[in-house]
Image: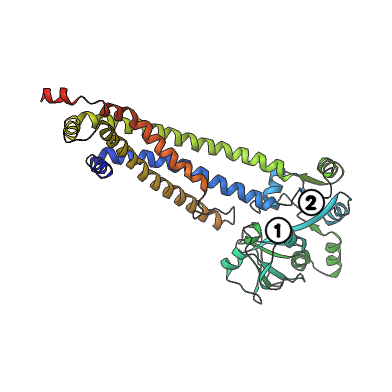
Amino acid sequence: MNVLSLSWRLLRARPLAALLNLLLLTLGLASVAFVIVVGAQVERSFTRDLAGIDLVVGAKGSPLQLILAGVFQIDVPPGNVPLSEVQALQAHPMVAQLVPLSMGDSFRGLRIVGTTPAYLELFGLEPARGEPNWRPMQALLGAEAAEATGLVPGQRFVGQHGLGGGGHAHGDTPYTVAAVLARCGCVADRLVLTSLESVWQVHEDSTAVDEEDRRALQAEREVTMALVRYRTPLAAVTLPRLVNASTSMQAAAPAIEVTRLLRLLGVGAEVLRGVGAVLLASAALSVFIALWHAVRERRADLAMLRLLGAGPARVAALVVCEAFWLAAIACALGLAVAHAGVALIGSQLAARQSLPLSGAVWLPQEGWVLLLAFAVALLAAAVPAISAYRLDVARLLERD
């Protein structure tokens, strides 16, 4: 007797119960897999983008807002800070590197970020086409930005006021694409980088009414924020306090703020895990009831199998295999649903130039979903399988 094929036929003989059990198992496993895939990608993205950044300095406001806007480019910065204060901080002996950022414009929803060549060094960026040029009104496109816009080195484009697009176009000061950067898998992939002078020039040209007004604007130049690397570990204790107490700026430690953010996200993940656990418990109970009733209804058939030579263990294996068929199908469907959900959310986030999520990423941790599916199936099938194992053939034949 082929246990696998026979258990499959027994499962198909009760299609309504099988579909209900399959639905509950699939939803529960999909919830667990979704949390695993999204959690791993978000954590990896945060870790990758924060590499080498010890402190973010910007206008006073929410520290988490500084991190989200300055490092991950998914929030609006709280304001600008004087260039003179940033330059003074750069000269501090505890600062090994300071990378200024100036934001406020965009192109087709992609953020235009004014910075220095140190930004390329910070993220290890290399050109894929063209050569980096930091002269005013030259732009470097991240890999995803280049794909989204179709721009190549030598072409020109006009930025728009505002980070979300749709603002006033700076038509008198177009940018020229100098290079397209190689894909790094980091935040820079979805940015348009240019020099600080480019950002200043765009806004000074659009607001200055005469040369005297232009000189006044140049004397009051600002940047949005700065990314800082410490020279010594002691700076982690003294530098943030110094910035917060003696300047008009605010210092935010990425490690602390991201830990808080992940804790907040963890609450949602725990809720989703809880929903998955409830669904799996319901599925286990439903499978147990279905198999228990199936064993009771099929006692005559099982007794006939025993008479034909099937041992008690093989009859019990039929029940277990029936549950395992459900687990295998539900696991495949659950993983498919989870990855489809991640892909759907990832496409929505990509349209908003937010955190990258991909449904095509498969993780070794997803193997736990398979183990969980078979553990639930085994737990649900244990009592019905024991009942089938202990089936009294002689008594059943006497009744007949």
**Considering depth in this image, is 385 or 277 the residue closer to the camera?**
385
Q: Is residue 228 above or below residue 368?
A: below
**Considering depth in this image, is 346 or 325 the residue closer to the camera?**
325
In terms of sequence position, does the residue under pointer 1 or pointer 2 come before the other? 1
Quadrant (top left, top right, bottom left, bottom right) of the N terminus: top left
Q: Which quadrant of the structure image shows residue 356?
A: bottom right
- Provide residue 143's location: percent of width, then percent of height: 61, 65
> Type of residue at label 2?
Arg
Circle 2 residues within 10 Å: few <14, some 14–19, many ≥20: some
Residue receiving disc 1: 123
The residue at the point 67 percent across, 43 percent down is: 258
Horizontal side of residue 133 vs 12, given as left or right: right
Can you tell which mark lies on residue 92?
none
Quadrant (top left, top right, bottom left, bottom right) of the C terminus: top left
Circle 1 residues within 10 Å: few <14, some 14–19, many ≥20: some
Can you tell which mark lies on residue 229?
2
